Amino acid sequence: MTVKVPKASLAAPHITASKQELLNIFLSHKKTFSSSASDILLSASSTLSKMPILIQDYSWKENETTVIITVPLKGVKASKVDVFSTDQYLKVSFPPYLFEIQLLAPINEETSNCKVGDGAVIFTLEKLQQITWGKLSDVSQDDKETWKQLRQQAVDKAHEKAAKDAEEKAKKKREEHQLAVKRQIELESQEKKRIEQIKDAERQKTTQEIENWKETDSYRTKQHTKNEKNSIFDNTMKDDIPAPRSSGSIQVKFTARTFPTAARESKAQEEQEVDLKTFLEWLDKIAAAKRPKGEPGDNPEESDPMWLKDKGSSFFKAGDYLSAINAFNEAIRIEPILPSLYLNRSACFLKIGDYPHSIEDCCKALERLTPPVPANAAQRSKAFIRRGTAYFKLELYVDALQDYEQAIKIDPNNESLVQDAEMIRKIIQGSDPVDEDTVE
């Protein structure tokens, strides 16, 4: 049933006298009233005209299970009608008319319904007890105090029901969220298990292929040739190896520095000052090397990981990959939790061909990019791509394909990733020649 909770204020008391009757009373006794009494009566008439008019011409019928109440709308549009109900209280308000009633017995709110239209409001109420009421209500319309209490009770009950419904809805939402998380964990476990099974199958297949290859004539011929080469080196020139040279010492004498020019023209003092400056700089470098890690040096920027990261990026763009690696190493030593530092260093290792260290840095970056959320999706995709590229360079095509598929899940609209993954899949199937310059 449509229920609308009203405001805390209650409806005004009902009236039975019309505005016209009050005016007739006033006109018949106009001469006997003083001017002040006339003003009071006119004010009262104006106030009463603003009060709601109680609907009396409603109809109802019942059987043992159902009660049907029909309330005429008096020509008022259905959009202007406000319906409020509880299990025992009904109210229909369409100014200036009002219908309200306290039912004789409670009803089932879940199965009852209300229809507004065709010039009437029709309540179809299901009884909780299958008995004949005989009358619709036992509360007198003239008992204002009782009606005031009933209205307040109905409002309180409606608020309690609304709060209970909100709590049940929140509880259901939490349960659905927990169920979704549990299902996601199960799916991830199944996917991980499937990937491990594929890895084991590929491993077994590769091992079997290697064992089969060892049984071929080409492998035996290659091994025989290798053994012959080893025997040649083992049997020749064993007796012709000369003995190690004896140690000795060489003495070197340096010529003393002289300044043959006149003392007033000599540069000896200036050169000594330059040598002293160089010596002091060397002492500063020694002190910096002996300084404990983590202690700030003379340059505060060198202890800022973001400054070091920008410095490393500048070296990378300039093609100085070793200097970039040194900058990222220092930044990681100061701030080891930033995944972007490991991603940048992995790119440097890829450029110099150090693929195992590139894979290690990508794994460390992925460990720090948990849990997977949309905010770190780009970094996770970059880590999977770089690790997959390193696996490809090491000819670990199955691992490379798995990382590219993970990147495609994050960025499914990237056509370049899809093409690279398809190329790796063809290599694994043996239908495409290996081109190491294709995947970057």
Image: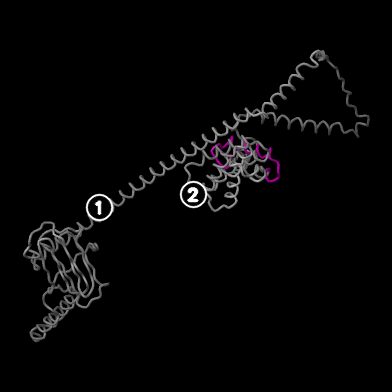
Mark 2 belongs to which amino acid?
Pro
Applied colour scheme? one colour
Q: Nearer the viewer, mark 1 or mark 2?
A: 2
Residue found 15% across the figure and 59% down from its top: 107
Q: In the rendered image, which quarter contains the C terminus?
A: top right
Q: Position of residue 62 (x, y in %)?
A: 10, 65
Camera-side residue of 37 and 361: 361
Q: Position of residue 65 (x, y in %)?
A: 12, 60
- Graded by Cα atoms within 10 Å as few (under 14), some (14 to 19) or many (20 or more), the crowding at tag 1 reads few
Q: Is residue 437 left or right of residue 429?
A: right
Q: Give the CA separation, mark 1 to mark 2.
A: 35 Å
Q: Is residue 437 above or below residue 105?
A: above
Q: Is residue 181 left or right of residue 336?
A: left
Identify the residue at the far front of this view: 217
Secondary structure of residue under mark 1: helix
Q: Circle 1 is placed at which residue position?
A: 164
Residue found 79% across the figure and 17% down from its top: 236
Q: Is residue 123 above or below residue 427?
A: below
Identify the residue at the far left of this view: 134
Q: Which mark is residue 203?
A: none
Question: Where are the magenta residues, as a range?
Answer: 315-342
**Is residue 103 visible to us here?**
yes
Camera-side residue of 43 and 149: 149
Q: Main secondary structure of the magenta part?
A: helix
Does residue 300 show up magenta in the picture? Answer: no
Does residue 318 show up magenta in the picture? Answer: yes
- Graded by Cα atoms within 10 Å as few (under 14), some (14 to 19) or many (20 or more), the crowding at tag 2 reads few
Q: Is residue 217 above or below residue 104?
A: above
Q: Circle 2 is placed at which residue position?
A: 374
Mark 1 belongs to which amino acid?
Lys
Q: Quadrant of residue 226?
A: top right
